[in-house]
Amino acid sequence: MLTFKLIWDEENVDVWVRPYKIVCFSNDSGLIEPILNTVSLHQIKKNSSKSLRDYFIDEYGSPENESFQHAQRNFMQSCAAYCLISYLLQVKDRHNGNILLHSDGHLIHIDFGFILSISPKNLGFEQSPFKLTAEFVEVMGAPNSALWSEFQHLLLKGLMAARKHMDRIINIVDIMRKSAQLPCFKSGSSATINNLRNRFHMNLTEPELERKIEQLVQDSLNSLSTILYDGYQYLTNGIL
């Protein structure tokens, strides 16, 4: 997470991500930095039947207000960053208890226990490239808004920047492969690395990559698996 942030800062890509610190004491114990001034999307839905955009209006005022637009932009920039991270690292278990909303409007993903294609109980529900719901799009102002266009442009810029530093990212994953007992490396670790490399799409030109981004966005928005997984989490864990 920190590596992605550093890369995007170095390449002047205007996305936002919030790494948090973890201190390990042993193989099965440690401390995780708390993320303050946040509420999970689950908690928002539990406390109100309103849409996420209506929640923004309640918190930040009318869409014409500067405070709303500032929070809206924060939401868009962070959503772009976490969409890219979720796609490249294949982060799963993206239910609404694992996605937080900061008081300034930024989205923050937590709990990265399922990465590089492993999933809870190996059910494989989540087949979309990343979690991007109609509610998220509504917060950004719908598909015909300038902010939505900027969101897709940031996805392109963010992926192009990550491609420039692909080896830097893969080297970190390779170190994990050699030293960590992660399930994603137990059945063919070389395949895991190769699949990660393929998701950078080094063979595509910039126009081709732009079309690929558009495809990933549409696949995510139209994904039945996202709806099914949210439904599964509600039935089994009460997560809205």
Image: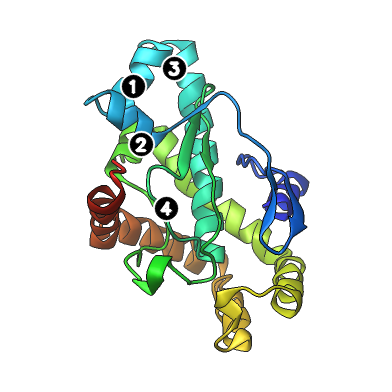
Q: Residue at x 43, y 68 (%)?
A: 119
Residue 121 as seen in the image, left or right of residue 103: left
- Residue 175: quarter of image: bottom right
The residue identified by callout 1 is: 55
**Front-most of 189 and 61?**
189
Q: Earlier in the sequence, mark 1 or mark 4?
A: 1
The residue identified by callout 3 is: 68
Secondary structure beneath disc 4? loop
Q: Earlier in the sequence, mark 1 or mark 3?
A: 1
Mark 1 and mark 4 in contact? Answer it, CB < 8 Å: no
Q: Residue at x 54, y 22 (%)?
A: 104
Q: Earlier in the sequence, mark 2 or mark 3?
A: 2
Q: Earlier in the sequence, mark 2 or mark 4?
A: 2
Measured as percent of width and height from the top left, residue 187 is found at 55, 87
The amino acid beneath tag 4 is Arg
* Up/down of 205 relative to 194, above or below: above
Image quarter hosting the C terminus:
top left
Residue 235 as seen in the image, left or right of residue 136: left
**Front-most of 33 and 156?**
33
Secondary structure beneath disc 1? helix
Measured as percent of width and height from the top left, residue 213 is found at 45, 60
Q: Which mark is residue 94?
A: 4
The residue identified by callout 2 is: 42
Q: Earlier in the sequence, mark 4 or mark 3?
A: 3
The amino acid beneath tag 3 is Phe
Measured as percent of width and height from the top left, residue 55 is found at 33, 22
* Up/down of 59 relative to 119, above or below: above
In this view of the protein, can residue 74 be seen by the observer?
yes
Numbered disc in front, either 1 or 2 = 2
